[in-house]
Amino acid sequence: MLADLSPLIAATTQWLTRAYPAGGGALDDALCEAQARQAVTVAAWLRYPTPMDAALVGVAGPGGSARLDWITGSDDAPTPDEYAWRTWVDEVVASWAACLLADAGLARTAVATLAGSPYTAAGSAADFRRLLRPDDLARRAAALLRHPDLLAPVAELHHVGLLDALKPGQPLTA
């Protein structure tokens, strides 16, 4: 079994949904979070493609949200309650997820690239429907989260690295 990326995925998803919140009530929040979590999961699996990569990030930590907070204009010091989870935000994963949320074609390519990876070979039944085929309700709920212009400052940080990871024939490496 692969090393557990769930703390990184949860923290990065939380950062994205706080930076680009849903437009309405509880249903919108849930739909927005589902889309963010699927994009972050795909990005994390691409970024940490082997059990060793996943284990190393678990030991070293992903780096935190400080630069992302500054870029999005929320560079206030986190409260003590927020500080811990923010240390598990991965800037590259957040940037790659932003790219996937803003560009449906890139998202399809990324999911296709994962075919045969250790994550999908481990029996993952994830079809990433919310990321790849959001319905109108999901699109409205995540209007900010999927807006290319709003995502651009975060997406542009590591867009080139994502494109390199998606080149045909390339081994998945970070």
Image: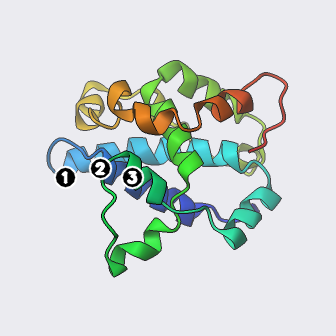
Instruction: Mark 1 and mark 2 in contact? Answer it, CB < 8 Å.
Output: yes
Mark 2 vs mark 3, foreground winner is 3
Percent x, y of residue 116: 78, 37
Which residue occupies 49% across, 34% down? Answer: 155
Task: Judge whether residue 129 can be spotted in this image.
Answer: no
Instruction: Mark 2 and mark 3 in contact? Answer it, CB < 8 Å.
Output: no
Q: Nearer the viewer, residue 57 or 104?
A: 57
Quadrant for the N terminus, please. bottom right
C-alpha separation, residue under disc 1 versus residue under disc 2: 6 Å
Q: Nearer the viewer, residue 101 or 84?
A: 84
Which circle marks residue 70 in the picture? 3
The residue under label 1 is which amino acid type? Ala
Which circle marks residue 26 in the picture? 1
Identify residue for label 2: 30
Q: Residue 28's image quarter? A: top left
The earlier-in-sequence mark between 2 and 3 is 2
C-alpha separation, residue under disc 1 versus residue under disc 3: 28 Å
SS for dot 1: helix
Q: State whether residue 121 is above or below residue 168.
A: below
Lateral position of residue 30 relative to residue 120, left or right: left
